[in-house]
Amino acid sequence: MRVEELKGELKKSGFDFFTGVPCSILGGIIKALGEDYIPSVREDTAIGLACGAYLGGKKPCVLMQNSGLGYSLNVLTSLNLIYGIPVLLLVSYRGFEGKDAPEHLIMGKHCVELVRTFEIPSKVCEKDDLKGALVEANRYVEKGKPYCIFIKEGTLE
């Protein structure tokens, strides 16, 4: 999917607050979001910003590497899941199938299982199913739940 198309689909679904920690796989969509994207120093901080934005009437989306999920689990479990604060997580899938730098391989092997353990629904996307994943994610977000879309390298153009 082209990044401009992804941006359009996110906006069409009502997402209007974007934050996160930059990653090369997500660089194109971050650039496309432009001034709509607010960079954060850490992934858990980005989730906190998204929660505040939601409480202020926004529909948040957080962009991060899968390595940032480790930082974010406490916030997701003790804030989002307990209080029904939705957030769409667009997560770059570093270390997918053991292909990446060594520091990404362990999280790459376990990140999908990790979010499932915490009962956060997720989808690993290819180019052709990202739009459908956004539709599914939006259904969960509209019900007050987080949803995680894993984006593999090469999914975004």
Image (spheres, rainbow, N blue to C red):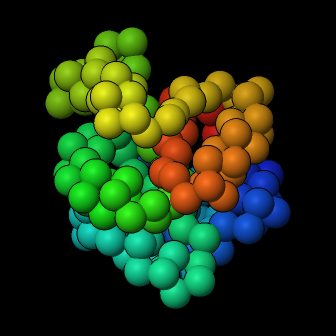
Rendered residue at 73%/29% (across/down): 129
Rendered residue at 44%/71% (across/down): 50
* Left or right of residue 67, residue 130 in this image: right
Q: Indicate the position of residue 111 as horizontal and vertical percent values.
A: 33, 29
Observer-nearest of 30 and 76 = 76
Is 13 rendered above or below residue 3? below
* Left or right of residue 147, residue 125 in this image: right
Rendered residue at 54%/68% (across/down): 60
- In the displayed orientation, state which residue is furthest to the bottom: 56
Q: Is residue 37 visible?
A: no
Q: Indicate the position of residue 8 as horizontal and vertical percent values.
A: 79, 60
Q: Indicate the position of residue 18 as horizontal and vertical percent values.
A: 53, 69
Asked where in the image residue 49 lies, by quadrant, the reply is bottom left
Quadrant housing the C terminus: top right
Observer-nearest of 7 and 51 = 51
Quadrant housing the N terminus: top right
Asked where in the image residue 136 lies, by quadrant, the reply is top right
Q: Is residue 132 visible?
A: yes
Observer-nearest of 66 and 138 = 138
Q: Indicate the position of residue 87 as horizontal and vertical percent values.
A: 50, 59
Asked where in the image residue 142 lies, by quadrant, the reply is bottom right
Rendered residue at 20%/53% (across/down): 74
Is 28 rendered above or below residue 20? above
Is 83 rendered above or below residue 130? below
* Left or right of residue 100, residue 132 in this image: right
- In the displayed orientation, state which residue is furthest to the top: 97
